[in-house]
Image (tube, rainbow, N blue to C red):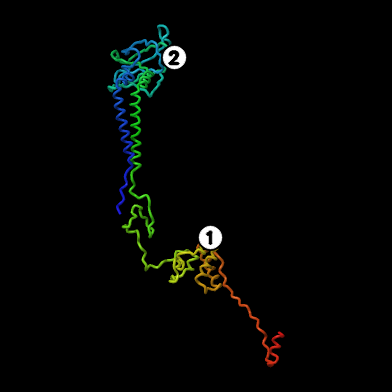
Amino acid sequence: MQPPEPAKRSPWGLRFAGAGGLLLLLGALLMSSQASNLDASMDPRVQHHGEPYTGEGTFALGELNDTCYRFYQISGEPDMDVKLHRVEGSSLAGESLEENPCLLDWQAMATDGEVFVERAAWTLNATGEYALVISCETDCSEVSGWLMSVDALQSGLLSSTWLVVGGAMCCLGVLTTPLALIVYFASKPSKAPRVMMVGPEGQLIPITDVNPDHSTMFVQADPDTPVQPTVAPPFADTAEQQPSQEFVDGLDGVASGSLLTTEQVYALMRGDVQGAQDHAKAERYQSTTAEEAIQDAANAAAIASWDEGVPLAEPQPVQRTVAAVKRPPTTPESGPTNAWKDWDEQ
């Protein structure tokens, strides 16, 4: 018999990993091919409202029609303090608008690696004319900033089909990688066998070791070892100590107490324990008297009660009663002529 093949991991882990890597590669290629569209939508230096605003001062913005706006600067430059005012006629109306961040999932970035810093953000509830008031704590005459519409950034990205497809493929590739790891480690073959078998001596045998060469398989019992009765009390005392040679076809097991007859099984199913004992006695011990059978049954019941922890009354000895035979009274011999006459008169 050939040895069993070693356990292998499930191929689905590698398949998922390969699919994830392929999606990441294709998505990166599509995204890189759309670099110009990315800059046109997400770079504040390209996609902004009006002109770049440099230094301090008040800058008219004209009419703003979108809802979400942000003011960006290049990271590392002096900070600009930016305020947004509503314009009525030719002057600023009231105080500056309160800042309110919006559309936080969309942020400005550039393909050349430039980092931008957000200085202010507003949410506009109505269309109108607005103006920016910029002030600096340090000299910012050479520093520029850009007012960017986040609504335009969002619509520009979603309007490019290849950008959407490339981004979706990259996201699927990133999600597939942990799934591939889970499948890979979950399919790790276990060194211990999953199915065990109980051997003739009670030991556990791996099912993969069931072969004719196994040392614990196909072991014949020693013929010199006496067979111990396996029938539990109160039937073990009804077994013969030496199996008779005249019984065949399982009668040896019945005689030794290792098997029960059909009648004994039916008696046990009916709950008739004493009947099962009496039947075992009646078939093999025809010479057993009724008094001995009753005494044996009482002893067996007492043993069973001891095992269960229930005390029983002491068995009473069976009193044998012998019926008296009526004999005719003895009369003195009166002679041969009157003997039969006297007997008839009685």
Mark 2 crowdedness (10 Å alpha carbons): few <14, some 14-19, many ≥20? few
Image spot of residue 139 (x, y percent)? 29, 14
Mark 1 crowdedness (10 Å alpha carbons): few <14, some 14-19, many ≥20? few
In the depicted view, which residue is nearer to us: 103 or 287?
287
Residue behind mark 2: 126
Residue 158, picture quadrant: top left
Q: What kind of residue is marked 1? A: Met
Which residue sits at x=46%, y=64%?
A: 259
In this picture, residue 113 sits left or right of residue 102: left
- Choose mark 2 or mark 1, whichever is in front: 1
Say which quadrant the N terminus sits in. Answer: bottom left
Q: Secondary structure at mark 1?
A: helix
Image spot of residue 125 (x, y percent)? 44, 16
In this picture, residue 193 sits left or right of residue 253: left
Q: Secondary structure at mark 2?
A: loop
Which residue is situated farthest in the bottom direction here? 335
Which residue is situated farthest in the right direction here? 345
- Establish if 120 lies above or below 299: above
The Cα atoms of the two marked residues, 2 and 1, are separated by: 92 Å
In the depicted view, which residue is nearer to us: 283 or 73?
283
Image spot of residue 211 (x, y percent)? 33, 56
Residue behind mark 1: 269
Which residue is situated farthest in the front direction here? 249
In the depicted view, which residue is nearer to us: 79 or 159?
159
In the depicted view, which residue is nearer to us: 176 or 51?
176
Q: Earlier in the sequence, mark 2 or mark 1?
A: 2
Residue 58, picture quadrant: top left
Q: What kind of residue is marked 2? A: Ala
- Establish if 248 lies above or below 97: below
